[in-house]
Amino acid sequence: DIQMTQSPSTLSASVGDRVTITCRAGQDISRWLAWYQQKPGKGPKLLIYDASTLEGGVPSRFSGSGFGTEFTLTISSLQPDDFATYYCQQYNSYSPYTFGQGTKLEIK
Amino acid sequence: EVQLVESGGGLVQPGGSLRLSCVVSGFTFSNYWMHWFRHVPGMGPMWVARIKGDGTMIRYADFVKGRFTISRDNAKNMLYLEMNSLRAEDTAVYSCARGGNLFDAWGQGTPVTVLS
């Protein structure tokens, strides 16, 4: 299975800050990476797929980049609704789907 | 509104069995791949099994192969996970999700505790 490693595990930030979360894949996954946001008691919400394509309805302050083994999720100006846990997920064709361990974004 | 609601979780002894259900609404169930995931605190979602809209193309994670069975009833808008030979390490919240390689709708999950 392809291991996905996120950093940091926890991130403290303030409203209006620009934040970046990194996700590293254990092997080359091309652009087959998605980002999800999860809040307590709810299922994950798909934000970005194919590394950089924004899911419909997701605010443009979210962006993704990367290719191969290193990827980033950036939130350009944090809003109160953005404090949540974020996961990356790979969907390489020949491997079971795997997720990173998560990054908890907390209010500073 | 798209909704997925799981049920059937509970407390079971090692070696026991449970059958989880997921009822869906708000979309044409038979058109979608469906999946089961499990969630453990401090870790990301762990994919368990998938099934195509027509009930074919079933695949399992290695850690449940031979013990769990995914199935669906498109007439009833129901997805199932039959879990046998349960182990302590199967303890988790199990949720169903819709999608192919990307998962755009999830249920809230049903907890499974395997404890002697």
Image: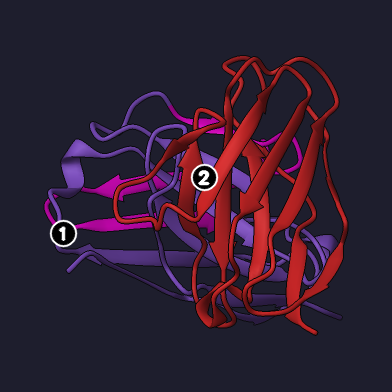
Q: What residue type is labelled 2?
A: Thr
Q: Tell me: A67 left or right of B43.
A: left
**Chain identity of mark 2:** B
Quadrant location of the N terminus of chain B in the rendered image:
bottom left
Q: Tell me: A100 left or right of A59.
A: right
Magenta run includes residue B14: no
The residue sitting at 61% across, 78% down in the picture is: B111
Vertical side of B34 occupied by A96: above or below: above
Magenta highlight range: B58-83
Q: Which class describes the residues within 10 Å of circle 1: few (<14), some (14-19), or many (20+)?
A: few
Quadrant location of the C terminus of chain B in the rendered image:
bottom right
- Rendering colour (chain B): purple
- Looking at the colours in the rendered structure, which chain would you say is drawn in red? A
Residue B41, by quadrant, is bottom right
Say whether residue B45 is visible: no
Q: Which one is in front, B40 or A81?
A: A81
CB under 8 Å between callouts 2 and 1?
no
Q: Tell me: A30 left or right of A60.
A: right
The residue sitting at 76% across, 41% down in the picture is: B63
Q: Which one is in front, A56 or A43?
A: A56
Q: What element carries label 1?
A: loop
Residue at the disc numbered 2: B69
Residue at the disc numbered 1: B76
Image coordinates for residue A32, horizontal then vertical, percent: 58, 24
Vertical side of B19 occupied by A32: above or below: above
**Marking on residue B15:** none
Magenta run includes residue B60: yes
Q: What residue type is labelled 1?
A: Lys
Q: Which one is in front, A71 or B2?
A: A71
The residue sitting at 58% across, 46% down in the picture is: A35
Say whether residue A105 is visible: yes
Vertical side of A44 occupied by B52: above or below: above
